[in-house]
Image: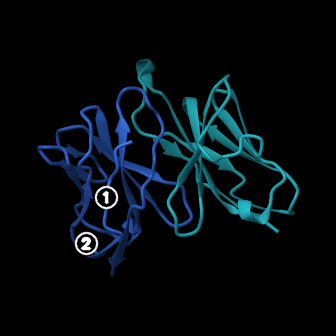
């Protein structure tokens, strides 16, 4: 499975935008980029996913580099409830179902 | 959004006993369910993949006789930790992916709230 690299931790002030980077230089053409987040003592929660084009949903935006070797999850206005570990995961689009989690980025939101 | 319910959320058991954890997809059919384990301050580690009506596929290093998985219906998978020991104490999480409208495979996985197992 192609590997992703994320910073261990990041901080953001409340109500400010947050850009969470992810490097995936060995990504293959069939890999989708998925983002999940895990709040303390809870199971992970789906955030967003994309293949080539930038994606927006009610939770966040996903900006994908043109060469697909990196992506950025954008939280437009961080709230205290966004404090979590954010995981960037590559999932093959050829039918494989399992997700392999890396170490993720622990986001701290400062009031 | 789709809901995956895991039960119990917390369990304490004595060493040597067995514990069963249930994972249910409440509003969709989950053809495939996954079981993860997470130790404190670590990431999730995939233990096994269960497909409805067939045997589970275990990841390398996971003992299939210790962690029994049953996926008897499209909405229920169970993980039984047999002869539990203190080192099995962990946060166990299930996830499910299934089919949405028109039989389309859903891209996102939905996770249960997790079960914190403490073996004393």
Rendered image quadrant of residue B103: top left
Q: Is residue A92 above or below residue B87?
A: above
Q: Which chain is cyan?
A: B
Subunit that carries the residue with mark 1:
A
Residue shown at 39%/34% (left/top)? B107
**Can you say which quadrant of the picture contains the N terminus of chain B?**
top left
Residue wearing tag 1: A5
Give the colour in which the image draws chain A: blue
Point out residue B73 in the picture as x, y percentages from the top left corner. Answer: 68, 26
Q: Nearer the viewer, residue A70 or B103?
A: A70
Q: Residue at x 38, y 72 (%)?
A: A80
Per the image, label 1 sits on a secondary structure element best described as loop
Horizontal side of residue B116 vs B1, given as left or right:
right
Circle 2 crowding by C-alpha within 10 Å: few under 14, some 14–19, many from 20: some
Observer-nearest of B31 and A57: B31
In the displayed structure, B30 sits above or below B38; it is above
Disc 2: host chain: A
Q: Are marks 1 and 2 on the same chain?
A: yes
Measured from the top left, where is residue B100 in percent x and y?
45, 26
The residue identified by callout 2 is A15
């Amino acid at each position: 499975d192609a590997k992703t690299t994320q910073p261990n931790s990041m901080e953001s002030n409340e109500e400010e935008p947050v850009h969470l980077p992810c490097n995936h230089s060995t990504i293959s053409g069939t890999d989708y980029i998925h983002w999940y987040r895990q709040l303390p003592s809870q199971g992970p929660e789906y955030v967003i996913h994309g293949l080539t084009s930038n994606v927006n949903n009610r939770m966040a935006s996903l900006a994908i580099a043109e060469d697909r070797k990196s992506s950025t999850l954008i939280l437009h206005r961080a709230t205290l409830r966004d404090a979590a570990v954010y995981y960037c995961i590559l999932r093959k689009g050829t039918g494989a179902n399992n997700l392999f989690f890396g170490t993720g980025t622990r986001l701290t939101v400062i009031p | 959004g789709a809901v995956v319910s895991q039960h119990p959320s917390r369990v304490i058991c004595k060493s040597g006993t067995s514990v069963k954890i249930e994972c249910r997809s409440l509003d969709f059919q989950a053809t495939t369910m996954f079981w993860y384990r997470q130790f404190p301050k670590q990431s999730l580690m995939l233990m096994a993949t269960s497909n409805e009506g067939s045997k589970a596929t275990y990841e390398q290093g996971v003992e299939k006789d210790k962690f029994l998985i049953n996926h008897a219906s499209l909405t229920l998978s169970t993980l039984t930790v047999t002869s539990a020991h203190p080192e099995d104490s962990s946060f166990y999480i299930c996830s499910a992916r299934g089919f949405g409208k028109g039989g389309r495979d859903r891209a996102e996985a939905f996770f249960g709230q997790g079960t914190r197992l403490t073996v004393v």
